[in-house]
Image (cartoon, rainbow, N blue to C red):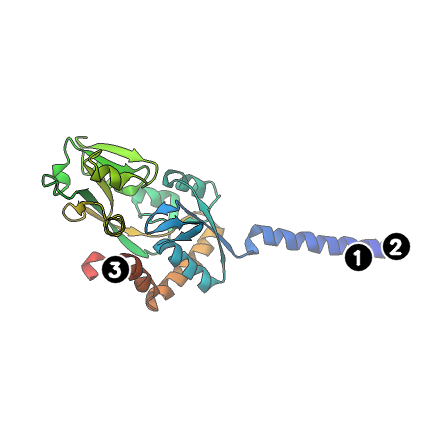
Amino acid sequence: MRRKGWLVGLLTVMALVVTACGQSASGDEKVLRVGATGQSYPFAYKEGEELKGFDVEVMEAVADKLGYELEWQLTEFSGLMGQLEAGKLDTIANQVAVTEERKEKYNFTDPYAYAGSQIVVKEDNKTINSVDDLAGKTVAAVLGSNHAKNLEKQDPDKKIKIRTYETQEGTLNDVAYGRVDAYVNARSVLIAQIEKSELPLRLAGDPFVYEEVALPFKKDEAHDEMREKVDQALAELREDGTLQTLSEKYFKDDVTVKKEEE
């Protein structure tokens, strides 16, 4: 009888250990798995072995608010959404524009920034001043980026030749050296990249589309709960001025408010 009681006690302890381990594996560990390209200056880019950028610092501030650890996973932009859908990521911090198509698959936080799709050309190019001037021209765009899709929507007759790149690497050089006629990306990132590269480039006109930038999460109960916590942290960071400070650090401008509010 005494042995039977000891065995029952041992099994009870083992059950508690298994239960505790199961809870930890199911999400009690405060880890946020975040995807980025690591090549998107100045949003999420590597400098040596260190990951830097506006989106990176926003997520670090969010994690600090929530007491979470960040686990970064880097890949090409075209593969990030697939990893999110497959559950390999919790969210993506790489200037993800909110679109109707994406909202069908993911739930988004409130916007933490606003992006204007912008054309950039060689400095001495006087013939391209808007999207209307791109017919018959070759325009660089990052594969899977919403800026490429925005440009396609402006070109129903398919007169623009869009050349896609896996990353931003080389796009500005190709414009500067005449390998392509123009490049489309967010206005804020182009301003920062032109300043850093010192290449002979200029912005052609104004942005032709403005969009909200937010953090996407998979549509399920666990990620809904996580998204609500992140949303609250973003609201606090907006209220205490952190988002504006980070924006002005990287863009010398506040991209965290709508254009009409500036």
Tag 1, which secondary structure? helix
Crowding around mark 2 (Cα neighbors within 10 Å: few <14, some 14 to 19, many 20+) is few
| Gap between marks 1 and 2 measured at Cα | 10 Å
- Nearest to the observer: residue 126 or residue 22: 126
Where is residue 60 drawn, in percent x and y? 43, 58
Does label 3 or label 2 sit earlier along the sequence? 2
Question: Which residue sits at x=46%, y=55%?
Answer: 226
- Mark 3 or 1, closer to the camera: 3
- Residue 62 picture quarter: bottom left
Between discs 1 and 2, the one toward the N terminus: 2
Q: CA distance from mark 3 to mark 1?
A: 65 Å
Disc on res. 9:
1
Mark 3 element type: loop
Say which of marks 3 and 2 sits in front.
Answer: 3
With 205 as the anchor, is 214 left or right in this view?
right
Outermost residue toward the left in this view: 126
